[in-house]
Image: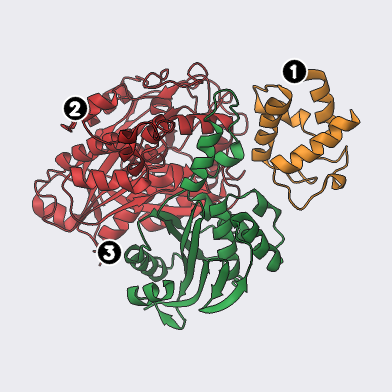
């Protein structure tokens, strides 16, 4: 699970163009949206594409993203349970 | 008569303000070049990194043009010859491969030229009138009457006219601010002279 | 003394008809134009519904009497068809006898053809002319050529508010004596580029769109073209031709919130409506019908609803005709302008199709039946990505 969390941090920084942040800046339980990393609705959609492309998980409803993308912790847990790649 | 109070040119790694060299970068790759100017001007706006190349160019140019402006009543008239083609191509590439089909929402968002206006509006909180023209070259014959109309009817206090061109390795930007007072008269001849 | 802006001609082609009469008939018969995609293949064909015009490019070219060997994109074909209708409707025999212009808008341009042949250009050099017809200005120039116009022509591209801005700009030029008359509007064809792009934004519905409904799932993309002929009132009256309606007000403002989402309290929409009222010098209470932007996305309808409640102390009858035609992007404001003119001429309010459950956030219920009542002023909203919000006010008399 640790390795997956680190991997997620690197991937998120790359996919969302978070150029002035390093993976050490992101804590596992930091909120990704709202006050945390300040991600927006388009970023949420990019994360949905990431789930599909890297882990083979297809989300039909963007609203599911709200729960899954709360933090690195919740993302890693969801991916571990549902990945097909 | 209205006047051009300020103008910016961005070409070949250089930025010119009112005809004088203002900043220079040795980077040739467009992304690195824009990032260099962003850092040189000590801008703190992380959303910059998500923008496509056309928006980055428009953003950097207007950052300098509107640097000391307090007015929020600034209308935006942008133009280029290729609309959002630079990013359209990137989007097309992402939907080309049937087996590895992963279109990016963040790229698609930028497949409209007027998003560049949106980014500048968000940055400077300008809720003014705006328009994007697609034209072969600098649409001075449209800009002048439209600008006069906006200022005469008090729809704006100032107007930014911006030619923002980015396609592949080619880019150039020419932006100028029109208002009641300034050094240069807003005439077709003067504007074409400044652009050269 | 500024001249008033009269509408003397209208032309339209959409998924509910290829003439003004056909469109009107569909609107009052509650006949939707939403269906499954047929004209080209898309992997999403079973996941989306569209407002597709059931004519192939070959059929359109034939209707326009164009030669078979051509590099005409669908965007141009639709645009030329509608523009020609508008010119005939305005009884124009010599298009260059007065200072006449064309202001057209598009978001797709020639994309429908360039994407079709994208992989083949190396092997098939005969497709290369299609690349030239890709850019947004090309369809405008070709439309100008088709209707024989030698004067002023320009292209706007501000996403879903494009045609409203074209109408605004045309009205301004006529008011200020820069042109005697102007043909204004927009055209957009369906393409894989837009279907795939909107799919990735997850705002497409897999069912018929349901504007202002609590359970709305998103928009249906559509294709269409529409143009209006605007003339200075003096010239229109001097010629004795029928004036269909007037453009009495317009406004444009930027939401300055996000690239694609609208602000929660609909600031941009509120401001564009406010500016339109200031220009028209009428009160919100004088509006008899609103043709809303109403795309049926969760975000737009909430934001627009809030803006309506802010500016109207009592919101008049409103509907979204996108429930019939889908969202036709750069053409949307133009076809909705034609519908606004029809509403004034026929004293008729058009319904929103598929509405079932009111939204929880406020009490706003769109018109769901065709309704005949005197109509003096109609307001039409069109909001584009990039925060570009535009409002037009059409009036029967001034």
Residue at (77, 20) in percent of width and height: A83
Disc on res. A84: 1
Q: What element does badge 2 sit on?
A: helix
Residue under label 2: C62
Q: What element does badge 1 sit on?
A: loop
The subunit letter for the residue under badge 3 reads C
Disc on res. C176: 3
Palette colour of chain A: orange
Palette colour of chain C: red
Report the residue that reaches farthest toward the right: A2
Mark 2 or 3, which is nearer the eye? 2
For the residues bearing labels 1 and 2, Cβ distance under 8 angstroms: no
Estimate the spatial distance between the alpha carbons at disc 1 and disc 2, rounded to whole Å. Answer: 51 Å
Which one of the lettered chains is coloured green?
A: B
Mark 1 or 3, which is nearer the eye? 1
Task: Tell me, yes or no, whether dots 1 and 2 are on the same chain.
Answer: no
**Picture quadrant where residue A71 is located:** top right
Estimate the spatial distance between the alpha carbons at disc 1 and disc 3, rounded to whole Å. Answer: 64 Å
Asked if residue B157 can be seen in this view, the reply is: no
10 Å crowding of disc 2: few (<14), some (14-19), many (20+): few
Estimate the spatial distance between the alpha carbons at disc 2 and disc 3, rounded to whole Å. Answer: 39 Å
Q: Which numbered disc flags the more N-terminal residue, 2 or 3?
A: 2
């Amino acid at each position: 699970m640790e390795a997956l969390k680190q991997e997620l941090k690197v991937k998120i920084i790359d996919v969302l163009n978070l150029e002035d942040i390093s993976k050490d800046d992101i804590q596992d339980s930091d909120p990704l949206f709202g006050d945390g990393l300040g991600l927006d609705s388009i970023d949420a959609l990019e994360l949905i594409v990431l789930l599909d492309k890297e882990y083979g998980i297809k989300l039909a409803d963007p609203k599911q993203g709200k729960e899954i993308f709360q933090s690195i912790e919740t993302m890693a847990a969801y991916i571990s349970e549902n990945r097909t790649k | 008569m209205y006047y051009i109070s300020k103008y910016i040119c961005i070409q070949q790694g250089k930025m010119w303000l009112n005809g004088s060299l203002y900043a220079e970068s040795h980077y040739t790759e467009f992304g690195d070049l824009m990032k260099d100017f962003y850092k040189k001007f000590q801008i703190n706006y992380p959303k910059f990194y998500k923008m496509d190349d056309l928006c980055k160019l428009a953003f950097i140019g207007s950052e300098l043009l509107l640097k000391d402006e307090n007015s929020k009543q600034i209308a935006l008239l942008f133009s280029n010859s290729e609309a959002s083609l630079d990013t359209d191509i990137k989007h097309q590439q992402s939907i080309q491969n049937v087996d590895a089909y992963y279109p990016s929402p963040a790229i698609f968002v930028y497949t409209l030229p007027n998003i560049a206006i949106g980014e500048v509006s968000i940055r400077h909180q300008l809720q003014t009138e705006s328009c994007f023209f697609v034209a072969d070259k600098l649409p001075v014959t449209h800009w002048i009457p439209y600008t006069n109309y906006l200022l005469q009817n008090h729809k704006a206090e100032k107007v930014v006219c911006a030619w923002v061109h980015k396609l592949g390795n080619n880019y150039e930007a020419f932006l100028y601010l029109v208002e009641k007072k300034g050094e240069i008269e807003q005439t077709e001849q003067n504007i074409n002279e400044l652009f050269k | 003394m500024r001249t008033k802006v009269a509408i003397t001609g209208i032309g339209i082609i959409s998924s509910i008809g290829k003439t003004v009469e056909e469109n009107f008939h569909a609107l009052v018969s509650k006949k939707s134009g939403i269906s499954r995609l047929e004209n080209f293949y898309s992997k999403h064909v079973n996941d989306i519904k569209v407002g597709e015009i059931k004519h192939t490019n070959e059929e359109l070219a034939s209707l326009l009497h164009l030669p078979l060997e051509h590099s005409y994109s669908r965007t141009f074909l639709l645009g030329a068809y509608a523009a020609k209708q508008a010119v005939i409707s305005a009884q124009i025999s010599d298009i260059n006898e007065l200072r006449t212009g064309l202001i057209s808008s598009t978001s797709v341009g020639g994309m429908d053809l360039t994407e079709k042949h994208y992989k083949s250009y190396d092997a098939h050099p005969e497709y290369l002319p299609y690349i030239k017809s890709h850019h947004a200005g090309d369809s405008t120039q070709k439309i100008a050529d088709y209707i024989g116009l030698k004067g002023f022509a320009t292209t706007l591209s501000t996403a879903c508010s494009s045609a409203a801005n074209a109408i605004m700009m045309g009205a301004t030029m006529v008011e200020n004596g820069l042109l005697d008359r102007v043909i204004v509007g927009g055209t957009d064809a369906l393409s894989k580029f837009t279907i795939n792009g909107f799919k990735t934004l997850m705002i497409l519905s897999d069912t018929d769109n349901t504007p202002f409904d609590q359970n709305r799932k998103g928009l249906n993309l559509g294709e269409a073209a529409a143009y209006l002929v605007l003339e200075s009132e003096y010239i229109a009256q001097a010629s004795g031709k029928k004036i269909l309606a007037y453009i009495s007000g317009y406004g444009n403002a930027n939401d300055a919130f996000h690239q694609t989402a609208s602000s929660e309290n609909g600031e941009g929409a509120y401001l564009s409506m406010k500016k339109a009222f200031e220009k028209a010098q009428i009160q919100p209470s004088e509006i008899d019908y609103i043709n809303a932007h109403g795309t049926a996305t969760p975000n737009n309808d909430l934001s627009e609803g809030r803006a309506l409640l802010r500016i109207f102390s009592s919101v008049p009858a409103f509907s979204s005709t996108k429930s019939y035609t889908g969202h036709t992007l750069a053409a949307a404001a133009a076809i909705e302008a034609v519908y606004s003119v029809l509403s004034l001429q026929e004293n008729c309010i058009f319904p929103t199709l598929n509405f079932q459950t009111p939204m929880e956030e406020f009490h706003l219920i769109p018109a769901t039946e065709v309704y005949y009542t005197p109509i003096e002023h109609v307001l039409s909203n069109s909001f584009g990505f990039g925060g570009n919000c535009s409002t037009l006010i059409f009036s029967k008399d001034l």
